[in-house]
Amino acid sequence: MHQLKVLILGPSTFYSTLSELKPFFKFNPVNKKSSSDFDVILFHEDTLNNKDDIKIVSNSDSIKIFASFKKKSFISFDAFLQLPTSLKEINAVVESAAAKNVFSKNSSIEIKKYLLNKNEKKLSKNENEIILTEKEIQLLELFLNSKEPISKDKILLNVWNYSSEADTHTVETHIYRLRKKINDKFSDENFIINTKDGYSLWKKEIKLQKICLHVSTEKELLNLKRAKAVLKEKKNKLLI
């Protein structure tokens, strides 16, 4: 399991105290301000007096935990750590903030004009919704992350890991049921598109015909210009 990297910002005494407790933390405290490789920023209230530290906090998309003796309403943060504190409380606040962040990211994923809620296992549009199975959610996530059609074999590998009880027929059956479920509720026959290359959420636009037509037209115009030039040359010769 990935161990959270927590960037510590504040006075040297704050970081040195936390460093001494490092063996007992459920995360890895770091103080390399130049690095962007961290999951959480734990910043002391004294950080507000340091312009460079404030800039790091403001520009980061990481989870922000504000450590202070008193909450300050004008500060933006995801969790608050009341000072003075204890080892148990620090671990609890960091873990809780990280868990809430993961839950929030999973709570609502936009797919086309639909919303996928992984936590509640629902696909919704306007006021209509359907309940999804775990495999159906995995299929949608797989399709969402690819702009190209995905073959049945690749679906087997990513969703079923080539398990002994699964084959391409299993893929076809699950996708058929999912498409039917979506069509019955939302009247959307083209939510999942099936082509000779596999399954996809995105319709591939065909521009080849337009390109060929464009090139063909240019050639015709060029030939026409050449023909006119030849005729003009012949006409001039006849007039001499």
Image (cartoon, rainbow, N blue to C red):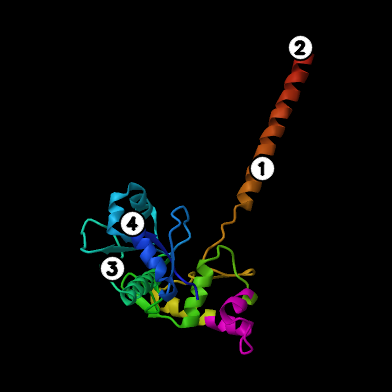
Q: Residue at x 76, y 19 (%)?
A: 233
- Would you place residue 131 above or below residue 214 in this image? below
Instruction: From the image, state whether disc 4 or disc 1 is nearer to you.
Output: 4
Q: Earlier in the sequence, mark 4 or mark 1?
A: 4
Q: CA distance from mark 3 to mark 4?
A: 16 Å
- Residue 239 position, x and y percent, is 76, 12
Q: Earlier in the sequence, mark 1 or mark 2?
A: 1
Q: CA distance from mark 1 to mark 2?
A: 37 Å
| Residue located beneath label 3 in the image | 81
| Residue located beneath label 4 in the image | 11
Q: CA distance from mark 2 to mark 4?
A: 97 Å
**What amino acid does circle 4 point to?**
Pro
| Residue located beneath label 1 in the image | 215
Numbered circle sitting on residue 239: 2
Can residue 66 be seen at all in this image of the molecule?
Answer: yes
Q: CA distance from mark 1 to mark 3?
A: 66 Å
Q: Secondary structure at mark 2?
A: helix
Residue 172 drawn in magenta: yes
